[in-house]
Amino acid sequence: MKHLIDPMDLSVQEIDHLLTVADDIILNKEKYQEVCRHKKLATLFFEPSTRTRLSFEAAMLELGGSILGFSSADSSSATKGESVSDTVRVVSGYADIIAMRHPKEGAPFAASRKLDVPLINAGDGGHNHPTQTLTDLMTIHQEKGRLNGFTIGMCGDLKFGRTVHSLIKALSRYEDIHFIMISPEELRLPEYIIKDVFEKKNISYREVKTMEEVMPELDILYMTRVQKERFFNEADYIRLKDSFILDERKLASAKKDLCIMHPLPRVNEISIKVDDDPRACYFKQALYGKYIRMALIMYLLGVSADEN
Ligand code: CP
């Protein structure tokens, strides 16, 4: 039984396979439309989501399968005190595969133990978001044609941003990647990632406080939202939320083929005027999320279009 809890649960070869299948799905959609017939996906979201939940559901529907689930803890028996493990165990009798988001770090891992259907971590607190990482890898692969040999700037909330943490881990396995971490002091990348990933693997990285000072160097700019829900103190949130806003003026010194990414949702950290810039990739990124989740569902269920 294979679960996806951490981005490192997938080998580089498995990621290559998923990217190849996702590319093929884009080109040959009709080939995949019955692949998951009679299969059911449960989406158990104990925390809000637009893209992850709906792209998972769209993915399963486009594969010919069915969906069930809930979109908030309030509409589940968690409100009566049921444990996540019990919820997931029960749902495993109703569905062939489960995607689960939970505000507590480690909840999907705990829930996956002894489970006899695949469980996908759709985001756990400030910890990991492996299917966003697959989405990000697919975006980089589509836009740059490779997953090595580039400089990536990651900007905003690097402390609580699970998408940043997961993407750094995943990219640490590819060659010749230079990381530039752009954040205020209060939202710096956690020390454990600096030590366990950058220093342990001897990966090139540096930390800066403005995007302007590094903009001309970047091949990819990965923007993130300062997440209100991760702060304990509203005053800190209000003080920091507008720290890093990308606009046309800041982009003036950027490379012509810069790829601007954002896992979304955006609040105001990218000016809407940037949306019309051909370098803005974030809406395409959200769409790629559906295709890579289609490939992932097929992989974890052990089905392929060739069997049809
Ligand atoms: N990127 C992402 O996880 O978006 P949602 O919170 O809308 O799922």
Image (cartoon, helix red, strand yellow):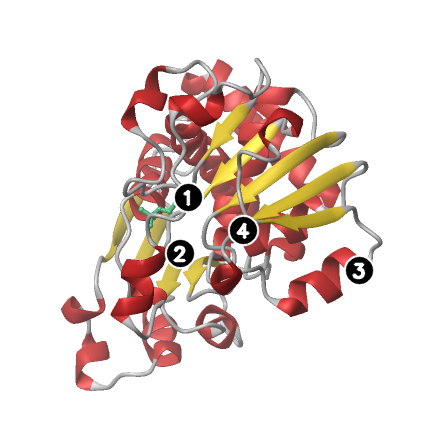
Q: Is residue 183 left or right of residue 87?
A: right
Disc 3 residue type?
Glu
Disc 1 residue type?
Phe
Q: Which residue is mark 1?
A: 244
The nearer-to-camera label among 3 and 4 is 3
Residues marked 4 and 1 touching at CB (< 8 Å): no
Callout 3: SS: helix
The answer to whether the residue bearing label 1 lies less than 8 angstroms from the nearest atom of ligand 1 is: no
Q: Which mark is residue 164?
A: 4
N-term-proximal mark, 4 vs 1: 4
Camera-side residue of 280 and 136: 280
Which residue is pictured at 49% across the width and 28% down the height?
Answer: 260
Marks 1/2: CA distance? 32 Å
Disc 4 residue type?
Val
Which residue is pictured at 49% across the width and 73% down the height?
Answer: 106
Percent coordinates x, y for residue 258 in the rendering: 56, 22
Marks 4/2: CA distance? 20 Å
